[in-house]
């Protein structure tokens, strides 16, 4: 009986064959799990760009545009390895391919090595340039983007034996613009009103950066002098009015009102220093009152010192598609800026909706006696100021209360400042370009393209003043040699001990 109990308590021996099968099954299971993890990671993964200038991180607008593509897009790259931006273009196109989620096919052809294939593609797309370039092909339409359009090359060092240097890489702007051209097929036309001393589009223009930026979004300008037309041309759905210095005539105002009544779209940047009562009356009929004042703020420069400035620091409000993606972004509006008073209750019966877009920061006040130099009065008015003034607004008539329902409507964007879009302002920061881009796309009913625009790349530069140069000299001549001297002395002392 004891022997039977002992036999029952002993563990059953496992044979070597069974152990081998168990080990093999575990190995197969581990390999299967590893393969599944790699397969899932290959199909579902994320990419991040941690570089300083986010050179390869696609802009939000580009990603939104790529999501609107329905068919397959083909990109044929003819770039020589000796081209300075070859690596940049290849890395950027990889980001396009990833964001396109299978809609973009890329073929890279080295024209110096694969001559037969390069000649075949050159003949197909009628390419006659020797410059490195790429061709975008979509549903039978194609467009060429040259290397010179994607970068600014600095050749100032060639006189000293240095090679050309890429001072700014603009590949995303050029490629996205070309993709929009071939996908949409036809450029949108934006009427630019002239005849009231507005900034010119060509020649010595101070809005050349803005013009080039808007044109890069598959939009072309058409100069529009209202004296030359009996009505605003029907092909123009949107017009742009920037800083007229003289008021519109009665005939011009009739054309403008007729355009508005026919679901017209208007972007108006008004100069507060210009006297335009008829244009202001048109805004007033829509519930937007352009006030005759100037925004000011007192800034503390010392313990008891205050300085008065008229440059307006403002932020964008996110309650409208124009500025939804710019919500709480700060921007500086140089020069004179007046306030806008919105009266939505007065125009609600006419199915007109008003949305504030830009609001001055806390502390700004609207001064009606702006030509005075009475600082005491300004300080009194500043203390009595109420809510921060509004300087930009959107007007829409005939829209549905449900944003998901698209209806034909009249739209207008107005800003009481014109200097913020001038070349000397937009080259310092890009908020103005982002805002104008969002406004134009909203007016053109291209809400899906509203987003943060591609970044304008700038070279990394260092500026050292006299104190910084002096500190650097002490570090190089004294500090660094002293560190090695101390290390040598420590090693010598350790060996001696």
Image (spheres, rainbow, N blue to C red):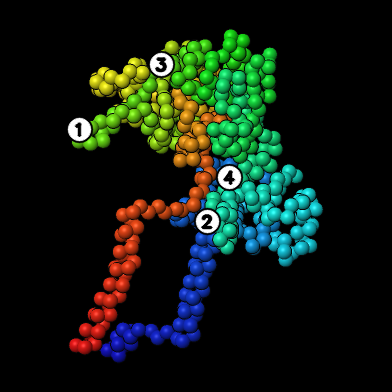
Mark earlier in primary sequence (4, 2): 2
Question: Few, some or many C-alpha atoms within 10 Å of disc 3 (few <14, some 14-19, many ≥20)?
Answer: some
CA separation in Å, label 3 and label 1 = 31 Å
Q: Residue 399 — which label? A: none
Q: What residue is pinned by disc 4?
A: 173
Q: Nearer the viewer, residue 5 or 467?
A: 467
Count numbered badges in the picture.
Answer: 4
- Residue 44 has which mark? 2
| Residue at the (56%, 44%) spot, across then down | 62
C-alpha span from label 3 to label 2: 57 Å
Percent from the top left, x then y, of residue 100? 59, 49
Task: Tell me how far mark 1 sits from mark 4, CA to CA.
Answer: 48 Å
Front-lying residue, 263 or 371:
371
Q: Is residue 421 above or below residue 486?
A: above
> Which structural element holds mark 3?
loop
Tag in front: 3 or 2: 3
């Amino acid at each position: 009986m004891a022997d039977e109990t002992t036999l029952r308590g002993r563990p059953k021996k496992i044979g070597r064959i069974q152990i081998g099968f168990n080990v093999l099954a575990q190995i197969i299971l581990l390999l299967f799990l590893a393969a599944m993890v790699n397969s899932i990671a290959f199909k579902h993964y994320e990419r991040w760009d941690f570089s300083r200038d986010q050179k390869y991180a696609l802009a939000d607008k580009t990603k939104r545009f790529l999501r609107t593509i329905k068919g397959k897009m083909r990109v044929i790259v003819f770039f020589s390895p000796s081209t300075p931006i070859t690596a940049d273009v290849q890395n950027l196109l990889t980001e396009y391919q990833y964001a396109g989620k299978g809609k973009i096919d890329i073929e890279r052809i080295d024209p110096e090595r694969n001559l037969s294939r390069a000649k075949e593609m050159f003949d197909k797309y009628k390419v006659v340039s020797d410059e490195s370039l790429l061709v975008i092909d979509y549903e039978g339409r194609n467009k060429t983007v040259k290397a010179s359009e994607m970068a600014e090359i600095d050749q100032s060092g060639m006189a000293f034996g240095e090679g050309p240097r890429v001072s700014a890489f603009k590949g995303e702007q050029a490629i996205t613009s070309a993709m929009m051209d071939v996908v949409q097929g036809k450029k949108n036309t934006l009427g630019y009103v002239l005849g009231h001393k507005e900034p010119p589009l060509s020649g010595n223009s101070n809005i050349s950066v803005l013009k080039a930026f808007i044109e890069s979004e598959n939009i072309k300008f058409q100069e529009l002098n209202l004296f030359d037309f009996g009505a605003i041309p029907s092909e123009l759905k949107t017009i742009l009015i920037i800083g007229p210095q003289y008021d519109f005539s009665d005939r011009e105002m009739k054309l403008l009102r007729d355009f508005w009544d026919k679901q017209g779209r208007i972007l108006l940047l008004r100069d507060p220093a210009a006297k335009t009562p008829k244009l202001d009356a048109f805004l007033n009929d829509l519930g937007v009152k352009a006030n005759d004042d100037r925004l000011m703020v007192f800034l503390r420069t010392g313990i008891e010192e205050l300085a008065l400035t008229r440059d307006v620091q403002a932020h964008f409000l996110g309650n409208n598609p124009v500025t939804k993606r710019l919500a709480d972004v700060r921007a500086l509006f140089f020069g004179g800026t007046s306030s806008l008073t919105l009266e939505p209750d007065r125009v609600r019966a006419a199915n007109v909706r008003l949305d504030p877009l830009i609001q001055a920061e806390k502390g700004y006040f609207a001064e009606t006696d702006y030509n005075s130099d009475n600082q005491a009065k300004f300080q009194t008015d500043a203390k009595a100021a109420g809510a921060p003034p509004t300087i930009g607004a959107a007007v829409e008539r005939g829209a549905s209360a449900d944003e998901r329902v698209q209806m034909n409507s009249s739209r207008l964007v107005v800003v009481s400042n014109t200097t913020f879009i001038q070349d000397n302002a937009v080259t310092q920061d890009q908020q103005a370009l982002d805002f104008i881009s969002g406004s134009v796309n909203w007016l053109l009913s291209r809400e899906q393209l509203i987003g943060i625009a591609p970044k304008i790349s700038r070279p990394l530069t260092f500026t050292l003043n006299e104190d910084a140069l002096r500190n650097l000299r002490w570090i190089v001549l004294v500090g660094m040699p002293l560190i090695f001297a101390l290390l040598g002395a420590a090693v010598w002392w350790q060996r001696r001990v």
